[in-house]
Image (cartoon, grey):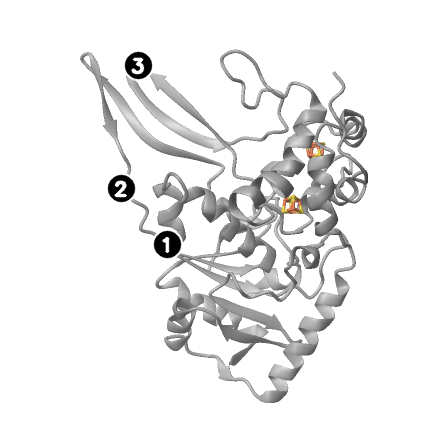
Amino acid sequence: MKKIKKQDIAKLLSQWQKDFTVFVPSKESGTAEMAVWDGKDAGFLDWYRNTVVPPKANFLQNMEKLFGFRKEGGSFKLETPPPETRKQLIFGIRPCDARAIAIIDMVFKDAYEDKYYLSRRQNSLLIGMGCVKPYDSCFCTSLGLGPAEAADVDIMLTDTGDEYLIEEITAKGKELLAKTSGAETASQTDENKAVAVKQAAYNKVTRKIDTKQIKQRLPDAFENKEFWEGVSAKCVSCGICTFLCPTCYCFDINDEMLKGDGARYRNWDSCSFPVYTKMPAENPREEKWKRVRQKVNHKYDFYPRLFNVIACTGCGRCIRQCPVNWDITQTLSGLPAGAPVTEKK
Ligand code: SF4
Ligand code: SF4
């Protein structure tokens, strides 16, 4: 293992910037997100806890042009963009957000291989940074994760005070570190310090949910209209919780055309919107309680049935960012016990 002084982080980033587009936490746009490093300093280390916009945006962009088309005579000529070859390095990704990307990978390489998403994934390196100050809204430890989980990153950094301990996790991470200068070999004392930091961070995540109980109670509560109406009463269907959720991946497709020139765009969508899934005949979830039920069930029941993993990492964004303080952990913990309820129309 290696270590580096915090004041030398910019030197690491400068080296990596030669081969990668380096993304770091930034508030430049007014909202904390991963943005291209300006090559100056690592001042973000002073305020960074997590971004508001999750790093899924580096792979599934909030809006992207899929291809262009031009009307020529009686047909259309397609202009497909070349495959993405830009190599990106995301510095400081939190363990929950790295896991979220691993979770949505399953969708984009399952029945249909999404070349836009997958080319970005293949050309990326994730440099994880363990949390030392989890938010009150975090509950990652209930989802088999933790503030120091390193399974989904290439390199993991642990904040030990004035320094970071650096662990190479994957072959890609090892290769990068081998050609990076400026990091020293860590001592046993450094490693022991990191173990203590990780344990302390784990203990700071005090919000809990019981996933075993949820697994049984959620399907039983599916037709319980009264329960879902109650928990969805204050939701204003703004969609923030889904846009900012690192595991939500729904998108819409739109064609724009002006004077024979057009393009097809993909943009984020949200099952919280009344117009979502507006099929030719009807929206199957016109009532708000059905949309809230969908959001919760998709993460905690439907996705596990498809991919054997809960599509929630306990990052807490949906709790922190909801304008009316809707709280998924309250909903999950409040699921009624007892026999399944049959739908009352
Ligand atoms: S952020 Fe809150 S109010 Fe907005 S859709 Fe989600 S739960 Fe509803
Ligand atoms: S549902 Fe909420 S806590 Fe779970 S991953 Fe999404 S934003 Fe994070």
Mark 3 vs ligand 1: CB under 8 Å? Answer: no
Residue carrying label 3:
259
Circle number at residue 122: 1
What's the distance in space between the residues labelled 1 and 3, CA to CA?
Answer: 37 Å
Q: Earlier in the sequence, mark 2 or mark 3?
A: 2
Q: Position of residue 114 (x, y in %)?
A: 37, 41
**Label 1 near ligand 2 (CB < 8 Å):** no
Label 2 crowd (10 A; few <14 / some 14-19 / many >=20): few
Circle 3 SS class: loop
Q: Quadrant of residue 20?
A: bottom left
Q: Give the image location of residue 149, x and y in percent.
A: 60, 65
Total marks shown come to 3
Question: Quick one: which residue is furthest to the front in this view?
Answer: 339
Q: Earlier in the sequence, mark 1 or mark 3?
A: 1
Q: Relative to 295, is 116 on the left or the right?
A: left
In percent of width and height, residue 23 lies at: 48, 55
Residue type at numbered disc 3:
Lys
Q: Which amino acid, by three-letter code, is at mark 1? A: Gln
Image mark for residue 82: 2
- Between circles 2 and 3, the one closer to the viewer is 2
214 in relation to 196, above or below: above
What is the three-letter code of the residue carrying label 2? Pro
Find the distance from the CA under tag 1 to the CA under tag 2: 15 Å
Q: Quadrant of ligand 1?
A: top right
Q: Quadrant of residue 227?
A: top right
Q: Secondary structure at mark 1?
A: helix
Q: Secondary structure at mark 2?
A: loop
Residue 204 disc label? none
Earlier in the chain: of badge 1 and badge 2, it is 2
